[in-house]
Image (cartoon, rainbow, N blue to C red):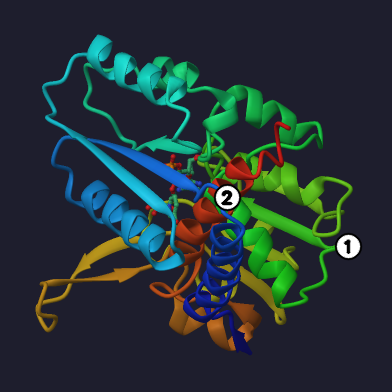
Amino acid sequence: MTIIDGKQLSETIKLEIAQEVAAIKAAGGKIPHLAAVLVGENPASQAYVGSKVRSCEQVGFQSTLVKRDASISEQELLSIVDELNQDPSVDGFIVQLPLPGHIDENKVILAIDPRKDVDGFHPVNFGRMAQGMPSFVSATPYGILQMLERYNIPTDGKHCVVVGRSNIVGTPISILLSRKAKVGNCTVTLTHSRTKDLPAETRRADILIAAIGIPEFVKGDWVKEGVVVIDVGINRIEDPASKKGYRLVGDVDFEQVAPKSSYITPVPGGVGLMTVTSLLMNTLKAAKKEIYP
Ligand code: NAD
């Protein structure tokens, strides 16, 4: 069993990005610039945005944090999006989700210029991704592809079972892995809350991707020997023994599933770190105008 080390892999990729940024700088080029919009005080969102900004500094990007109170109106937020769309110094930006209930998230996503949509949430990028055209691939699925590629895990002809059909993880990764591509050519089963006999489906998986949001949901007898497990879930569970009073676990019962796996991602230290790194990769692509020349 090999543990896919998201921390080490993301450090390697960040180093590659930092070298490229140094070369751009040395040649007198413009340093890539990522902006992040954070609305409200959601602690998880604050932590995610904080780590995105720190990662930008690590690789030498310029970063801007636009912070607004939860009471901001939808119109005000749309004006900020418009300003970032127009600002030639900003290569890419994200609006951290979830947004307060009075703001229509879809309206905000649709307002982002697809050329700066480094989260890959805009339907133009999603549609281009689905059709195999150059696009910003959303960060978590992109990170999963990187993990499979860089650990040389064969995907061709494999049966991949995805649990969870969210727009940001389950659905895009199911499309990506079924595409005719270097990391792809899987036969994919996309499962969800209405799937009948989920364990029967997951037992057929050569590659299992869990993006559900239920702590340690996938059990040892739900997988076959040799399965490759990508655990996307990040769940807090109470742990009085820990200083913070909680610890993070995935959607997979690691203790039970790891011994049967050929490869498995840990939580923490797996997909989460790759998500931030993928955002940096997308920002570099935006700065180099790779997707939209
Ligand atoms: P979501 O809440 O949008 O979707 C959950 C999906 O799980 C739904 O499609 C639903 O049909 C399915 N589901 C729910 N209950 C189920 C059940 N009993 N059986 C089968 N399927 C069921 O989730 P999301 O945004 O994709 O996030 C999923 C998990 O991944 C969360 O823990 C989240 O925190 C985590 N996440 C991690 C990263 C990362 O960077 N590692 C990024 C995004 C999300």
Q: Can you tell me whether the CB of the residue at mark 2 lies under 8 Å from the nearest atom of ligand 1?
A: no
Q: Residue at x 43, y 19 (%)?
A: 106
Mark toward the start of the polypeptide (2 vs 1) = 2
Q: Pointer 1: what residue?
A: 156
Give, as a three-letter code, the residue at label 2.
Gly
Picture layout, residue 188 above or below residue 60: above
Q: Kindly state the secondary structure of the residue where label 2 is placed.
A: loop
Give, as a three-letter code, the residue at label 1.
Asp
Q: In the rendered structure, are the residues bearing label 2 and label 1 in contact, judged by CB atoms less than 8 Å apart?
A: no
Q: Residue at x 36, y 20 (%)?
A: 83
Numbered circle sitting on residue 174: none
Q: Residue at x 67, y 73 (%)?
A: 228
Q: How many marks?
A: 2
Category of crowding for the residue at label 1, using alpha-carbon neighbours closer than 10 angstroms: few (below 14), some (14–19), many (at least 20): some
Image coordinates for residue 55, horizontal then vertical, percent: 39, 62
Tell whether 237 sits left or right of 268. Answer: left
Q: Pointer 2: what residue?
A: 29
Tell whether 225 sits left or right of 256. Answer: right
Image coordinates for residue 115, horizontal then vertical, percent: 59, 29
